[in-house]
Image: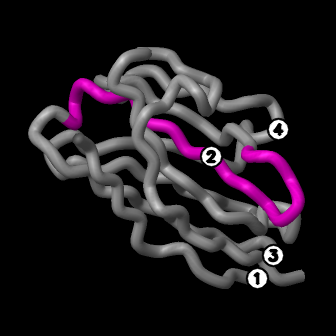
Amino acid sequence: QVQLVEPGGGLVQAGGSLRLSCAASGRTFGTYTMGWFRQAPGKEREFVSRINRSGLSTYYPDSMKGRFTISRDNAKNTVYLQMNSLKPEDTAVYYCAASTTYEFPLKSNDYNYWGQGTQVTVSS
């Protein structure tokens, strides 16, 4: 069983930055691929980024490239999402997720553990 806890989130002005973190339980964090998703009101859950077990491989959809950076610290069992140049349309609940079975998962169904989500609100 993997538990994911996401403190942080919050309110930021457009153009600002925010770093989300997600702490995982267990001693095998280094064997999980980690991802971030987001869901805005009335919209489907959207893939933001993923990072493989070692942290050497990351992936972003085209819409997320350039402003978001995913990273991980396996010694701290933590994955991060650095968000820069935030826009009001980035407002959403952000979820971290762990995949214990896929090394390069992209779909939400490929992830089997989820955090509770944290609200990010970007004001204009």
Gap between marks 4 and 1, in whole Å?
A: 20 Å
Residue 31 magenta-highlighted: yes
Q: Residue at x 66, y 31 (%)?
A: 60
Which residue corresponds to mark 4? Answer: 63
Q: Nearer the viewer, mark 2 or mark 3?
A: 2
Q: Nearer the viewer, mark 2 or mark 4?
A: 2
Give the position of the C terminus as an image quadrant: bottom right
Q: Amino acid at mark 3?
A: Ala
**In front: 79, or 99?**
99
Q: Nearer the viewer, mark 2 or mark 1?
A: 2
Give the position of the N terminus as an image quadrant: top left
Gap between marks 2 and 1, in whole Å?
A: 21 Å
Which residue corresponds to mark 2? Answer: 37
The stretch of residues the image draws in magenta is 29-45
Earlier sequence position, callout 2 versus callout 3: 3
Q: Amino acid at mark 2?
A: Phe
Which residue corresponds to mark 3? Answer: 14
Earlier sequence position, callout 2 versus callout 1: 1
Q: Is residue 108 left or right of residue 111?
A: right
Residue that lies at the very extreme toward the front in this rendered image = 1
Q: Are marks 2 and 3 in contact (CB under 8 Å)?
A: no
Q: Residue at x 66, y 72 (%)?
A: 120
Gap between marks 1 and 3, in whole Å?
A: 4 Å
Which residue corresponds to mark 1? Answer: 13
